[in-house]
Image (tube, rainbow, N blue to C red):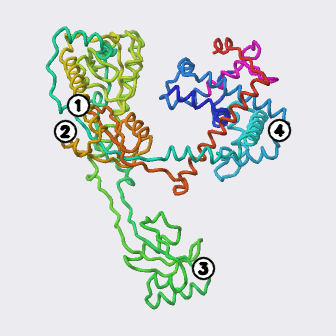
């Protein structure tokens, strides 16, 4: 992921977007993190632009806040530095400053009238009515620690940078001489005839002698490393631990039923269609047609109106005046015109679903279950507070558990994937995605915070011992090491057998003849591209080899427990004219890459012409 971050952030256009995105987060409520502090001079100097260390770190910490959801809210400043996020922030500040210096030299300016139009059109500052709300605007800026002047200054800078970016790369297209050969290369498809030779087609070698096995183990020790494991003491606090003392009486059940009566009632629903008309002549005509026994379809046709299907509706779904008329009609009936604020309606009720009211006895068990759970959660929260108070007062985990009759579980060893010393899942771990993460981020001989689990319980874990990663002794895993040695030797023998089949194919024998002699069944793949294709499970090295080969040539590669032999069957060229949407999409991607290259060169030229100074010491020391 670090490589992706760094590679993605190298392009100038993307750096501008990062800069603008970081600034936009100010508007959305991420306030200044670093304020005040004595300045020791600028941390970054770009021409006449000077940026202090607090300003850089302020932006760095806003970037950390923005990325927190990707890291489960656990990204620390130190981890962010290791990921290169501070370096990326510095690059963003430098790039933005270089662009500002270039724009200043070109005399580019942002017109206040245009800025104000952009701000008033921003949905972030619109009230419930969809219009610009000045009080909302001011409150959002205040929450971000910005004045109107400072926000306008930010917006002016964004507009000028966009002007320069558009002037530099706007409208850049990929030349056909570059794009079309690349499109044909990317879009070419191939099919292959394949044979799969399973390792099981050769006998399993005999187990090696002790010396051979020990030599193999020593040469492959890194494959037999036991991961870090931890011995844990776990305290679970669950609703069941407090439910026994909860009493639910009749009065409580009756009261809950009264409060939730609407929940236990299903209102009557009707399937309704209508036409809406206006004008006295149409209304009179509708009365006439309905008096003649015409249905809704006939009335709609005579008046040139479309029938509107309202689907299944409840009384509350319809406007006042119409609801009473609809719910007086029987199934299959068409009513007389009814006037509402929306016009005149002629409605037809196609079907009726009667309402239903559940009695107290119908829902008694559910009421009791819900009340018991609600009371248990309240008691659980109270118990968790008492438990934390006891631990905070110096009680050990075992003492606190005994005080409140809670169960403590000992786990002798568990790794970060939940496996025990035997490599099998440890039973009865707390059912929480957080448990192992908490256990492996808690310091030895300390207790974790009380953590909530999805079933509304809590757990607390103490790390009693940490066993670092180490090779598992050969004596303990002799059977596993032996099985691996045998599997590798078997695969080598099967691969040698497959290589002989490949040689026969290269010598000119037909695929069918070779397959029959080896007891294999040939098959042909679906068309695939260089990145593979749907329903084509070829290893990437085999795909690469097939695209490097000519029709009829053979390649081979390893599969899990097998060797694959593949021969190029067909080459299906890509025609940009016959696949215009895909070709245009690729051309746009190529054009964007060209724009990024041009922008990178422009930034490099600005860097050389204007000059950049960075005081890394300040950024390392500031917090």
Nearest-to-viewer mark from 2 and 4: 2
Q: Is residue 437 or residue 49 the one in the foreground?
A: 49
Q: Is residue 94 above or below residue 232?
A: below
For marks 2 and 1, give the CA distance: 9 Å
Q: Earlier in the sequence, mark 3 or mark 4?
A: 4
Q: Which residue is mark 1?
A: 497
Q: Earlier in the sequence, mark 3 or mark 2?
A: 3
Q: Is residue 141 or residue 530 the one in the foreground?
A: 530
Q: Earlier in the sequence, mark 2 or mark 4?
A: 4
For marks 2 and 4, give the CA distance: 75 Å
Q: Is residue 358 above or below residue 240?
A: below
Q: Which residue is mark 3?
A: 278
Question: Does the magenta run of residues contain 36?
Answer: yes
Q: Earlier in the sequence, mark 3 or mark 1?
A: 3
Secondary structure under badge 3?
loop
Q: Which residue is mark 2?
A: 518
Label 2 with label 1: CB-CB less than 8 Å:
yes
For marks 3 and 2, give the CA distance: 83 Å
Secondary structure under badge 4?
loop
**The C terminus appears in which quarter of the rendering?**
top right
Q: Which residue is mark 4?
A: 108
Residue 507 image offset from top left, x and y in percent: 29, 38
Q: Is residue 473 or residue 459 the one in the foreground?
A: 473
For marks 3 and 1, give the CA distance: 86 Å
Nearest-to-viewer mark from 3 and 2: 2
Q: Earlier in the sequence, mark 2 or mark 1?
A: 1
- Residue drawn 61% across the image and 43% down it: 178
- Residue drawn 16% across the image and 22% down it: 205
Secondary structure under badge 1?
helix
């Amino acid at each position: 992921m670090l490589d992706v971050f760094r590679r993605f952030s190298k392009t100038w256009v993307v750096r501008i977007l990062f800069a603008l995105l970081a600034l936009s987060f100010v508007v959305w409520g991420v306030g200044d993190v670093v304020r005040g502090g004595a300045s020791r001079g600028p941390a970054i100097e770009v021409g006449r632009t000077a940026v202090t260390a607090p300003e850089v770190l302020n932006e760095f910490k806003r970037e950390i806040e923005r990325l927190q959801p990707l890291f489960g809210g656990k990204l620390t400043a130190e981890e962010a530095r290791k990921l290169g996020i501070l370096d990326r922030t510095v690059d963003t500040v430098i790039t933005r400053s270089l662009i500002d210096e270039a724009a200043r030299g070109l005399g580019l300016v942002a017109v206040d009238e245009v800025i104000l139009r952009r701000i008033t059109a921003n949905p972030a500052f619109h009230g419930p009515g969809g219009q610009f709300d000045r009080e909302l605007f001011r409150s959002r800026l205040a929450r971000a620690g910005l004045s109107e002047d400072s926000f306008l200054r930010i917006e002016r800078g964004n507009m000028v940078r966009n002007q320069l970016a558009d002037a530099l790369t706007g409208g850049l297209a990929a030349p056909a001489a570059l794009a079309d050969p690349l499109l044909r290369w990317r879009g070419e498809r191939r099919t292959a005839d394949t044979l799969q030779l399973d390792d099981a087609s050769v006998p399993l070698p005999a187990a090696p002698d002790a010396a051979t096995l020990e030599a193999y183990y020593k040469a492959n020790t890194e494959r037999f490393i036991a991961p870090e494991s931890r011995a844990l003491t776990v305290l679970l606090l669950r609703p069941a631990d407090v439910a026994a003392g909860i009493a639910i009486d009749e009065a409580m059940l009756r009261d809950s039923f009264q409060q939730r009566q609407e929940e236990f009632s299903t209102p009557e629903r009707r399937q309704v269609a209508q036409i809406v008309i206006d004008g006295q002549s149409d209304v009179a005509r509708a009365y006439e047609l309905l008096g003649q026994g015409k249905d809704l379809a006939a009335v709609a046709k005579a008046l040139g109106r479309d029938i509107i299907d309202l689907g299944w509706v409840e009384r509350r779904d319809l406007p006042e005046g119409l609801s009473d008329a609809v719910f007086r009609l029987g199934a299959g009936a068409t009513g007389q015109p009814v006037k509402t604020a929306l016009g005149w309606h002629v409605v037809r009720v196609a079907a009726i679903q009667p309402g239903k009211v559940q009695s107290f006895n119908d829902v008694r068990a559910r009421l009791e279950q819900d009340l018991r759970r609600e009371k248990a959660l309240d008691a659980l929260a109270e118990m968790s507070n008492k438990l934390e108070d006891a631990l905070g007062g110096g009680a050990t985990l075992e003492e606190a558990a005994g005080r409140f009759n809670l169960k403590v579980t000992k786990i002798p060893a568990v790794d970060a994937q939940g496996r025990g010393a035997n490599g099998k899942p440890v039973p009865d771990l707390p059912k929480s995605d957080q448990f192992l993460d908490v256990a492996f981020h808690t310091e030895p001989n300390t207790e974790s915070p009380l953590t909530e689990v999805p079933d509304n319980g809590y757990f607390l874990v103490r790390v009693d011992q940490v066993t670092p990663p180490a090779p598992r002794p050969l004596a303990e895993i002799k059977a596993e090491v032996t099985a691996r040695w045998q599997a590798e030797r078997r695969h080598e023998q099967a691969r040698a057998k497959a290589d002989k089949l490949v040689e026969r194919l290269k010598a000119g024998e037909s695929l069918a003849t070779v397959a029959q002699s080896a007891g294999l069944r040939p098959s042909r793949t679906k068309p695939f591209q260089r990145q593979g294709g749907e329903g084509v499970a070829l290893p990437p090295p085999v795909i690469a080899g097939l695209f490097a080969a000519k029709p009829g040539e053979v390649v081979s590669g390893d599969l899990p427990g097998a060797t694959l032999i593949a021969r190029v069957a067909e080459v299906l060229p890509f025609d940009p004219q016959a696949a215009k949407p895909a070709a245009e999409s690729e051309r746009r991607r190529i054009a964007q890459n060209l724009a990024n290259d041009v922008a990178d060169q422009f930034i490099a030229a600005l860097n050389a012409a204007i000059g950049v100074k960075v005081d890394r010491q300040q950024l390392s020391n500031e917090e």
